[in-house]
Amino acid sequence: MINSRWIWSKQQYLPSEVASGYPILQELLGQLEDADWNQHDVFGVHLAVEEALVNAIKHGNRYDESKQVHIACKLAPDLVRVEITDEGHGFDPADVPDPTADENLDNPSGRGIMLMRSFVNIQYNDAGNQVTLEKHRSDGT
Amino acid sequence: MADNGRLEVSEVGGVTVIRFVDRKILDEANIQELGKELFALVEEDNRKSLLLNFSNVEFLSSAALGKLITLDKKVKAHGGKLKLCNIRPEIYEVFAITKLNKLFDIREDEAAGLDSF
């Protein structure tokens, strides 16, 4: 049975600068480790949140200093949820080319969403300026 | 052996072996400077045989993958070769998911990497 009582939560508005989200990300990872989430899960959450934050800052807000990124983290005994929202115009995730296609393999960018999907469940809002990342704890406790 | 801040650079039998020193985390924040240091080894120092040792790397994002791809192109443009080694399983998974394990020449350890040149 899934226990969805949140045991920890935190939210913050971040400036559109690389690394602005690292303190809250490190706090989230620390919460997972304190709750004995396994290393693979922690790595996956770390990577997914890193990629989502970079996308929000770089592609969503285009490093515009007048725009912020909102991050909201929640942790339950067997579930972690992170919602990241930018102030950009949004996009259609379906428009992102497959980075593993032969013709795209040596592109220097375009892998963020694929990596997010590989480690956590992701859901974009209709506008495409908000992504919700969810991961259920792997060991089932 | 030379320290370029974030990189430990040494020469072994004509191969430039590069290790990541202080930065175990290759994320968006630090990969830009790391990239500049790596590119300089090729474009300024004219090194042609590069072996990147990932033994200190605990995290790697898509930004780092992009820099590696660009580095690989620069090395090839200079007539050289880039190989990677000592990639721990979690990091290798990122290469495999993105199929970049097919693009890069990845060896198990430094000895195997050096032998392959």
Image (cartoon, coloured by chain):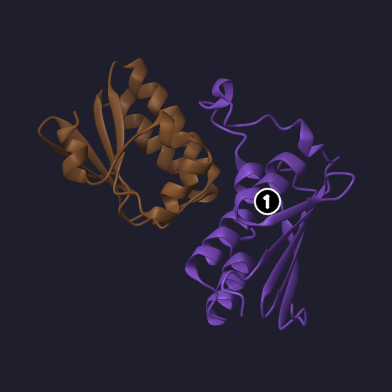
Q: Look at 9% across and 33% down and name the residue there.
A: B13
Q: At which x and y percent is residue A27?
A: 60, 73
Q: Quick check: B24 left or right of A42?
A: left
User: In the rendering, what colour is chain B?
Assistant: brown
Can residue B25 be seen in this snapshot? no
Q: At which x and y percent is residue B94?
A: 49, 46
Characterize the local packing of mark 1: few (<14), some (14-19) or many (20 or more) Cα atoms within 10 angstroms. many
Q: Quick check: B71 left or right of A116?
A: left
In the image, what residue type sits under mark 1?
Ala
Please identify the quarter of the rendering in which residue B76 is found: top left
User: In the rendering, what colour is chain A?
Assistant: purple
Q: Quick check: B79 left or right of A71?
A: left
Q: Nearer the viewer, residue A79 or A58?
A: A79
Residue that sits furthest to the right in the current view: A126
List the residue tagged with mark 1: A52
Please identify the quarter of the rendering in which residue A100 is found: top right
Task: Using the image, determine if residue A95 lies above or below residue B2.
Answer: above
Q: Quadrant of the C terminus of chain B?
A: top left
Can residue A29 be seen in this snapshot? yes
